[in-house]
Image (spheres, coloured by chain):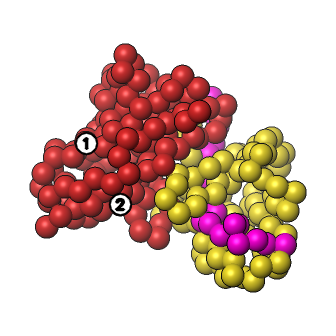
Chain colours: A yellow, B red
Amino acid sequence: DTGVSQDPRHKITKRGQNVTFRCDPISEHNRLYWYRQTLGQGPEFLTYFQNEAQLEKSRLLSDRFSAERPKGSFSTLEIQRTEQGDSAMYLCASLRTSGRADTQYFGPGTRLTVL
Amino acid sequence: AQSVTQLDSQVPVFEEAPVELRCNYSSSVSVYLFWYVQYPNQGLQLLLKYLSGSTLVKGINGFEAEFNKSQTSFHLRKPSVHISDTAEYFCAGNRDDKIIFGKGTRLHILP
């Protein structure tokens, strides 16, 4: 257990439905990342926050995806009008910046299945 | 262009035998390099990282990796594997505050 928690661990939904995932980072970690991992691939960067500010979004993040970190603590990732191609593991990671390739601590992930 | 390349998608090895998982990186990532392990149905756990200094990096669970600048490699090794090492291993590099992962190598431990 790294101290990063994600909820739910598994989500099954029908195509077209909206889903929301939550990530609780390690306390006092100022950066929070979202990654997506599809079968047989390594995780791919989606977006990240420094405190409550969203600093970067990947081109992988279509308009149907939105992420927030309203108080600089937990974060949510929402997918609207889900598609079968959204089926993946969604990973959250957090770190405390010290200026030199700081270690990212990963949560257990949320596995999304879109039927 | 692939920034981190893991040359083997699967590696079978007998229990108690040595293993090497290969990784090459490109110039598009910085030379901050990592190896992560992912056990079935779990998140990623950091095994070790290279930032600078000694090219031989020791990590958890008896793993070590060697940074080789001339060959742009960062191979992971363990002298004697155990059944509990069965997992997916990801090599990764840092680029612009993000981690760029390879596609992973699945380590199969044979009895």
**Residue A12's mark?**
none
In front: A25, or A92?
A: A92
In the rendered structure, which amino acid carries the disc numbered 2? Ala
Q: Chain of mark 1?
A: B
In the image, residue B101 sits, relative to residue B87, either above or below, namely above
Question: Which x, y percent locates residue A7?
Answer: 66, 73
- In percent of width and height, residue B100 lies at 57, 40
Q: Position of residue A51 (x, y in %)?
A: 78, 46
Taking the image as shown, residue A66 lies to the left or right of residue A94, namely right
In the displayed structure image, the side of residue B3 where residue A51 appears, left or right: right
Report whether residue A95 is seen: yes
Instruction: Read off the magenta span.
Output: A81-100
Crowdedness near tag 2: few (<14), some (14–19) or many (≥20) residues, C-alpha within 10 Å: some
Residue A63 higher or lower than B19, as above or below: below
Amino acid type for the residue under numbered disc 1: Glu
**What's the mark number on residue B87?**
2
> Is A88 in the magenta?
yes
B1 magenta-colored? no
Which element is circle 1 on?
A: strand
Which residue is at a point 84% across and 72% down the rendered structure image?
Answer: A81
Return the x and y of residue A63 as percentages of the image width and height: 87, 57
Number of disc labels: 2
Report in which chain the residue with disc 2 lies.
Answer: B
From this view, report whether residue A34 is shown above or below residue B34: below
What residue is rendered at 58% in x and 26% in y?
B28
Which quadrant would the C terminus of chain A be assigned to in this image?
Answer: bottom right
In the picture, measured across the screen, residue A98 lies left or right of residue B4, that is right
Residue that badge 1 annotates = B20
Q: Residues within 10 Å of mark 1 (few under 14, many from 20)?
A: some
SS type, badge 2: strand
**Residue located 41% across and 42% down the image:** B6
